[in-house]
Amino acid sequence: MAPVALVAALLAAAPGLRVAVAPGAARPGDAVLVRVSGAAAEPRGELDGRPLVFFPAGREWRALAALPIETAVGEVRAAIEAGGVRAEGALAIVEPGWPARAISGVPARFVEPPPDVTARIAADRAAFEAAYARPFEPPHFRRAFAWPRRARLTGRFGDQRVFNGVKQSVHYGTDVTGPVGSPIRAANDGLVVLVRDAYLSGRTVLVAHGAGVFTAYFHLSRIDVRHGQAIRRGARIGRLGATGRVSGPHLHWSARVGGLFVDPESLLAIDPVAGKARPRAPRLPPPAPQAPAVAGGPRPAPAPAAGAGALASPAVGDGAPLSAPPNR
């Protein structure tokens, strides 16, 4: 029987060829790991119609893949072919429970950017697209991904957001609170492929980790790495700030796998050494919290101290990052 953290769906298409998807249950917008063993040749395949790119891992082939945020609750399949042999693996999709959040206190110029910054936003978008267009390469990392900062969360991936009561967007990242100047560390080994002061994301660092995985760090007050620099997991890449479209200091941390933004918390759940991942439980939407106080107005009572998994009232203005390509 397969371990709880790894549910393998095996079809008798041919002896020896086996497909496993980890975890066995995931939410829309999650990253997952597809494992293929017993292949006589390099495998090809798809996960719910999206192509997979494999890399060798010992006696297996593996691919990190992304579930689109629009994926319906139910089941999807990984269809694999190797040396003329076919096999499939199943993955359960559970309720994501996206919360809705109202964000106030964001300067109007960031909610509806004025015409005179259109060219700057377009240049930022082009810079992100060029960095993300890096060719596929084997993973640079050997360990699991880690939090860039351990603190209260002020927003999670998939939040449905309304800015100053007018502009709706989806939040494609995780927001971590803290005072300006707090150290921000690389989530894993990789290569710095973008260092930029962007209009909406502020001072930004983008790291390529190989295997089609990128992590981005927005709103930094200071950047401590340079473009092209190889960095190790836990290395300081900058300091927390409030640059770009924000209503308070925080780190917006995002992850991209196979061309899609994914929930960074799902990436943290994958153990690339063991080839396992913690299953994702269904989540019901929590009640929408009160919007944060606007500068100069009354301030809400402080949230209780909590670990990295706790969610506080939002103090941010990050939606779908307009300075980065949309999720597709």
Image (cartoon, helix red, strand yellow):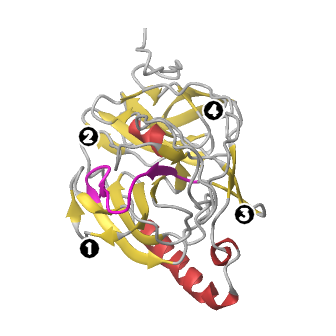
Residue under label 2: 143
**Label 2 Cα crowd, 10 Å radius (few <14 / some 14-19 / many 20+):** some
- Earlier along the polypeptide chain: callout 3 or callout 1? 3
Q: Residue at x 38, y 57 (%)?
A: 179
Q: Residue at x 52, y 57 (%)?
A: 259
Say if 295 sits above or below 69 in the image: below
Specify the amino acid type for callout 2.
Answer: Arg
Q: Secondary structure at mark 4?
A: strand
Q: Secondary structure at mark 2?
A: loop
Is residue 43 in sight in this rendering? no
Q: Secondary structure at mark 3?
A: loop
Relative depth, front residue between 179 and 288 = 179
Rendered location of residue 82, percent (x, y): 44, 37
**Which label sits on residue 226?**
1
Specify the amino acid type for callout 1.
Answer: Arg
Residue under label 3: 164
Specify the amino acid type for callout 3.
Answer: Asn
**Label 3 Cα crowd, 10 Å radius (few <14 / some 14-19 / many 20+):** some
Separation of marks 3 and 1 at Cα, in angstroms: 35 Å
Q: Nearer the viewer, mark 3 or mark 1?
A: 3
Residue furthest out toward the bottom: 116
Rendered location of residue 28, percent (x, y): 62, 39
Relative depth, front residue between 231 and 163 = 163
Q: Which quarter of the rendering shows the C terminus?
A: bottom right
Separation of marks 2 and 3 at Cα, in angstroms: 41 Å
Relative depth, front residue between 90 and 130 = 130
Separation of marks 1 and 4 at Cα, in angstroms: 40 Å
**Span highlighted in magenta in the image:** 172-190
Residue under label 4: 76
Relative placement, left or right, of 244 versus 101 is left
**Label 4 Cα crowd, 10 Å radius (few <14 / some 14-19 / many 20+):** some
Q: Are marks 4 and 3 in contact (CB under 8 Å)?
A: no
